[in-house]
Every structure is written in structure tokens, then in C-alpha cells.
Image (cartoon, rainbow, N blue to C red):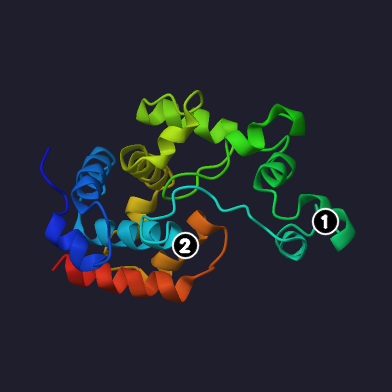
Amino acid sequence: MADVITEVQLTAFLPALQNAPTWTAALNAAMDRFEINTPARIAAFLAQTAHESGEFRRLVENLNYSAAGLCKTWPNRFANLDAAKPYDRNPELIANYVYAKRLGNGDTASGDGWRFRGRGLIQLTGRGNYRSCGLAVTLPLETEPQRLETPEAAALAAAQFWQSRGLNHLADDQSNDNDDEDFVAITKIINGGTAGLTARRTYWARAKAALL
């Protein structure tokens, strides 16, 4: 396997990155396996994953919401403060409630919401997604969900998601398309909207400069 990105390039992109050798090896293995192998593809992938994970520092979803935060984030599940107060600052209780009977999870008592909360570089969530991703990357993610808290599995899961959603094609620099519009489309597929788009564009510019 040829290196897709060097440690020098990665640290030029993220100067504060810790464990740069580990992340370089993990990203190279994942990007090589899922054909993220051109400067355009690599730059877009690094930009999006860096933003989603707080520069590769945050591999587990933060569910430490206040009651007010719950009402704002999940208004359909927490109609008012009184409904949210029992869950205030209780991440496990929150996860088991908001993710119950969704994404392949069981009910609140199953504990699936907490067990399969968002992990990895692109916050893989739900038993069903852990199962399908695990099969795709040949890792037992359904039985060992904590694996996604490691650089190796986190990078593989993100790269598999990227390729399976056609993001390599969107990232390709083609003469008959608008690269920025394609980057926005990638953001919507990953995020479900355009949250953090300005920061994502900044990371994208930095990644392209590092790959020169």
C-alpha cells in the first residue's frame, strides 16, 4: 500500500494534532482501501472529518445536554422544560430515550441508544448502522462498538461512509461542475444540513494547501 498522505502533510493541515504517526497510518489505510486517493478527494475528506471530530480529538458523541439544550435540539421529543428536566445532564438516559426504536435500536430499556451512540470521525449512530458498517469494513462493530473510538476503526468507518455515499465522485475536480457546490452537497450528506459550513471551507482550504 502506497501512502496517500504523509505525516508532514497531515501535521501541516492540523498543527495541534496529537498521535500524528498513528493517525497518518490509520488514515492511509482507510483512504487507500476506499479509493480516497487523489488530492481533491483527500482534501475534501480531511476537511469534513476534521470538522466533524474536532480535529480528530472527539470520537464519541457528547450528549451532556441541559434541559434547555434538549428542548432546542430535540423539540419533537422534549416539548417543554418539564418534559426535559428528568434527562438534564444525564447522557446515558438521554441517548437511550432519543435513539430508542430508531436506526435499528431496541426500546429505551434495551440500552441500545447509549451502546450505539455516535462514534468515529463521522459519528456513526445506531445498531443498524454499526452492523452494516462493521460488515463493510470487516470489524465486529455491533458486538464491540467501542472500537470506533480508535483511530484505525474511526478512519475506516468514515472512509467507508464516504465511498458508499458517492462522495469521491462529488469531490473529484471536474471541468463541468462547481467544486464549491459539490463541497456543500458533501456537507449536506454528512451533516444533514450545512452546519459549520464556513469552518468546513476553512479546513478544505488548509487541506488543499497542505497537499501541494
Secondary structure under the numbered disc 2 in the rendered image:
helix
Give the quadrant of the N terminus: top left
Q: Relative to 66, say whether 168 is above or below.
A: above
Q: Which one is nearer the viewer's eye here, 59 or 125?
A: 59
Residue 174 is marked as none
Q: Which one is nearer the viewer's eye here, 163 or 131?
A: 131
Type of the residue with mark 2: Thr
In the picture of the structure, the residue carrying the numbered disc 2 is 187
Quarter of the view holding residue 18: bottom left
Label 2 vs 1, first from the N-terminus: 1
Q: Dot 1: within a 10 Å radius of its alpha carbon, few (fewer than 14), some, or many (20 or more) residues?
A: some
Give the quadrant of the C terminus: bottom left
Can I make out residue 80 in this image?
no
Discs 2/1, front:
1
Q: Relative to 113, say whether 61 is above or below.
A: below
| x 44%, y 54%: residue | 58
Type of the residue with mark 1: Lys
In the picture of the structure, the residue carrying the numbered disc 1 is 85
Separation (CA) of disc 2 from disc 1: 33 Å
Secondary structure under the numbered disc 1 in the rendered image:
helix
Can I make out residue 144 in this image?
yes
Q: Position of residue 84 (x, y in %)?
A: 81, 55
